[in-house]
Image: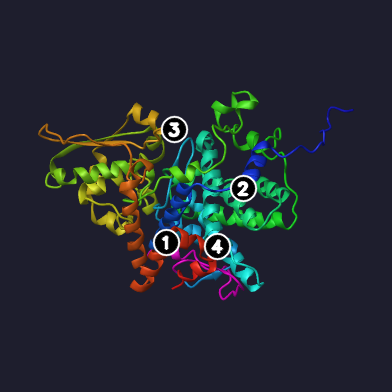
């Protein structure tokens, strides 16, 4: 036989795809901690969505593609009167949850925000539950939503533990698409073959580049990219449920597969390694680890690598507020990841640029003692030239211990330290914060603050009686889990 002919023997599905499908189909979520954390994650994510509705640049992207579209048993977008098809509703919910960079975070070899998957989960569950009731069947319960959240967190987070998509220039929303596709197919009632097909299509898609998160191109796409990925997950799951064939060797196919095309050629370190090392690596299987250990953004709407720097700056504010003109330099000690992602000099072009600038996120609380979403807006920045003056005086240095303990499984710290030096030779103490208030190690301190953040978010959109009704339901684990999804979503319509 000629050597110019490809052998057309169709392979089995790549093992990673099979593992994800089998996890989604067979795993029983029975961790009390995971389900309780999922409840808090649901509260926090929806609170973030409500806060985003205050920003016109976000709201302009919401709604149907064709104005006036009527969707029977359509999915509701929390905090609005929008009723959309599940694909666009997933886009809108995901956009709202992520817009302010205030929802949960996962940090490992890859970074990301697992609650980004809530767009797909909530939109699809609302639609399916209404459809069931209309057909005389039992509705979906919020327990199904919480279980889907645990699974989506786990898929995104476990793949992220050892696999740095950022090292090959790909954005972490590839993992949102992967996780959203898998749990959407599960909610739709997929068979194993349909799940395998859906997951393979998520991986064969073209994947987003990280360029919109980095200088000099940082912009607002980073605020809707996850909603887009989550929405795509719903669409791909629907395509698979319609009987579309999968691509079994999408990861491992020589020359044409994901590993060769997207996971190695653009990375010189990987490209020089043997083929078996240019593959996804896993240090553990899928269970409920990620939800149990997820990081909440409680105090600041800021990129997570800067959270502890912001905390340190708030502590230092009383010591520097009356000596701002005497500051000679400011030293920020941080982890390698923060230096690679958010350390910036020079002009900052827009709010998305500012909330991914370590120096900006440290300067504002040093000056004002707080940091909110409004502090990133153009008008606020223009009215406060001292922010950029302080940025110009900042030195960012890597602390090797912070970089090491950031990756250690028993620590997963996100440490920063800030110290201010004055022209007369004096200085403040070096304030070091190793674990942000949203870390699992600070759950007892963080959960009451998270609930207060949730209540404040509700008050921006709903009257007091509705706020009290939502809070009471969300604080009661058993009652929330047994609530039909469509009844839960009724509470979020204005």
The residue under label 2 is 24
Q: Check disc 4: other Cα within 10 Å, few if <14, some if 14-19, many if 20+.
A: many
Q: Main secondary structure of the magenta part?
A: loop
Instruction: Decide if residue 155 is on the left or right side of residue 197.
Output: left
The residue under label 4 is 141
Q: CA distance from mark 3 to mark 2?
A: 24 Å
What segment is highlighted magenta in the picture?
A: 54-79
Label 3 or label 4, whichever lies nearer to me, is: 4
Q: Check disc 2: other Cα within 10 Å, few if <14, some if 14-19, many if 20+.
A: many
Residue 66 in the magenta stretch? The answer is yes
Mark 3 or mark 2: name the one nearer the start of the chain. 2
Q: Choose between 8 and 136: the one closer to the eye.
A: 136
Mark 3 or mark 4: name the one nearer the start of the chain. 4
Are circles 4 and 2 on residues that touch, CB within 8 Å? no
Q: CA distance from mark 1 to mark 4?
A: 14 Å
Q: Position of residue 267 (x, y in %)?
A: 55, 31
Label 1 or label 3, whichever lies nearer to me, is: 1
Instruction: Decide if residue 60 is on the left or right side of residue 459.
Output: right
As helix, strand or loop, the secondary structure at mark 1 comes to helix
Instruction: Decide if residue 332 is on the left or right side of residue 319.
Output: right
Q: CA distance from mark 1 to mark 3?
A: 31 Å
The residue under label 1 is 474
């Amino acid at each position: 036989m000629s050597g110019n002919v490809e052998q057309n023997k169709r392979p089995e599905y790549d093992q990673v795809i099979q593992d994800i499908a089998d996890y989604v189909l067979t795993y029983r979520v029975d961790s009390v901690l995971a389900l309780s954390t999922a409840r808090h994650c649901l509260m926090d994510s929806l609170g973030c969505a409500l806060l985003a509705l205050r920003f016109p640049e976000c709201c302009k992207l919401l709604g149907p593609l064709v104005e006036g579209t009527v969707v029977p048993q359509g999915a509701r977008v929390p905090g609005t009167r929008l009723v959309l098809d599940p694909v666009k509703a997933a886009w809108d919910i995901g956009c709202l949850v992520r817009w302010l960079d205030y929802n949960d975070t996962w940090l490992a070899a890859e970074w990301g925000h697992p609650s980004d998957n809530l767009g797909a989960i909530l939109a699809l569950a609302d639609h399916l539950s209404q459809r069931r009731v209309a057909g005389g069947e039992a509705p979906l319960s919020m327990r199904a939503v919480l279980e889907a959240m645990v699974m989506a967190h786990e898929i995104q987070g476990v793949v992220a533990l050892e696999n740095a998509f950022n090292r090959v220039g790909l954005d972490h929303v590839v993992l949102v698409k992967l996780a959203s596709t898998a749990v959407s197919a599960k909610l739709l009632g997929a068979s194993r073959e349909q799940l395998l097909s859906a997951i393979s299509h998520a991986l064969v898609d073209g994947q987003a580049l990280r360029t919109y998160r980095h200088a000099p191109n940082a912009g607002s796409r980073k605020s809707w990219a996850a909603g887009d990925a989550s929405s795509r997950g719903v669409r791909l799951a629907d395509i698979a449920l319609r009987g579309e064939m999968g691509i079994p060797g999408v990861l491992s196919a020589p020359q044409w597969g994901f590993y060769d095309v997207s996971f190695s050629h653009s990375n010189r370190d990987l490209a020089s390694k043997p083929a078996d090392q240019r593959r996804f690596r896993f240090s553990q299987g899928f269970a409920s680890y990620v939800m149990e250990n997820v990081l909440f953004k409680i105090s600041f709407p800021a990129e997570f690598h800067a959270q502890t720097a912001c905390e340190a700056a708030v502590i230092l504010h009383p010591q520097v507020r009356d000596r701002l003109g005497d500051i000679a330099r400011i030293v920020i000690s941080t982890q390698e990841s923060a230096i690679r992602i958010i350390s910036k000099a020079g002009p900052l072009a827009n709010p998305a640029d500012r909330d991914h600038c370590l120096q900006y996120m440290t300067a504002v609380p040093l000056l004002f003692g707080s940091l909110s979403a409004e502090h990133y807006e153009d008008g606020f920045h223009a009215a406060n030239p001292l922010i950029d003056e302080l940025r110009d005086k900042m030195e960012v240095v890597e602390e090797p211990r912070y970089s090491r303990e950031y990756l250690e499984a028993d620590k997963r710290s996100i440490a920063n330290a800030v110290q201010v030096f004055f022209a007369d030779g004096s200085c403040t103490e070096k304030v070091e914060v190793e674990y942000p208030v949203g870390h699992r190690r600070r759950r007892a301190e963080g959960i009451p603050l998270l609930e207060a953040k949730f209540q404040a978010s509700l008050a921006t959109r709903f009257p007091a009686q509705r706020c009290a009704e939502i809070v009471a339901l969300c604080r009661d684990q058993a009652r929330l889990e047994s609530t039909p999804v469509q009844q839960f979503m009724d509470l979020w319509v204005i």
